[in-house]
Image (tube, rainbow, N blue to C red):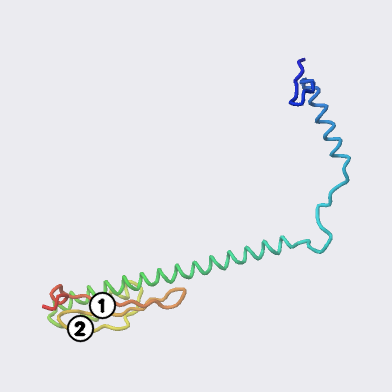
Amino acid sequence: MGRAVTPRGDARASSWRGRARCGASLLQAQRARPPVALHREDGERGSGTVLALGLIAVVVLLMLALGLMAGAQGGRWRAQTAADLAALAGAEHLLGASGDVDGACAVAREAVERNGGVLRDCAHEGAGVLGVAVDCSTPAGRAHATARAGPTTARWGR
């Protein structure tokens, strides 16, 4: 077959058989080396396992903390939703029943309980405005929310 010229000007055989011989001599040279130890004998065996377990523990703790924060935020949203709906329902009853504050608070309590909360406070703030305070339990504790509702005329002080 043909000969290839290297950048140094050496002529080498470009046959497949010649390449196989070069590869074979490389393998023989690698086999002649002394065996390499696969592990250290200086007391560091298992340190990678301990490091991996430590990293896994940190990741698990971060995930738990993230889960608690997400649960607390979800409880806060649920409490705010319950408070908003209770204030709206109570204010509508207050305006329709011509000032029945006890009935408005009973309607607000029912709305809060249907949304998984507990009515902490219900007060008539005048001019048909009803204010409520709500608690909801979460995995991280209790979430609190307040809301006010009433006619738009009460908003502008008319």
Horizontal arrangement in the rendering, residue 15 relative to residue 138 (left or right): right
Asked if 17 appears above or below 32 in the picture, the reply is: above
CB contact under 8 Å: marks 1 and 2 = no
Residue placed most toward the observer, 34 or 146: 34
Q: Is residue 92 left or right of residue 79?
A: left
Q: Which residue is mark 2?
A: 125
Q: Against 43, is 93 above or below?
A: below
In depth, the one of 55 and 108 nearer the eye is 55
- Comparing marks 1 and 2, which lies closer to the viewer? 2
Q: Amino acid at mark 2?
A: Glu
Residue 113: quarter of image: bottom left
Residue lying furthest front:
8
In the image, farthest residue toward the left: 158
Q: In percent of the image, x 22 and y 77: which residue is there?
A: 90
Q: Residue at x 79, y 25 (%)?
A: 19
Give the label on residue 89, or none: none
Q: Secondary structure at mark 2?
A: strand
Instruction: Give the residue at mark 1.
Output: 108
Residue 140 x %, y %: 46, 75
Element marked by disc 1: helix
Q: Nearer the viewer, residue 100 or 33?
A: 33
What residue is shown at x 81% (from left), y 23% (from top)?
18
Label 1 amino acid?
Answer: Ala
Image position, residue 65 (x, y; %): 52, 69
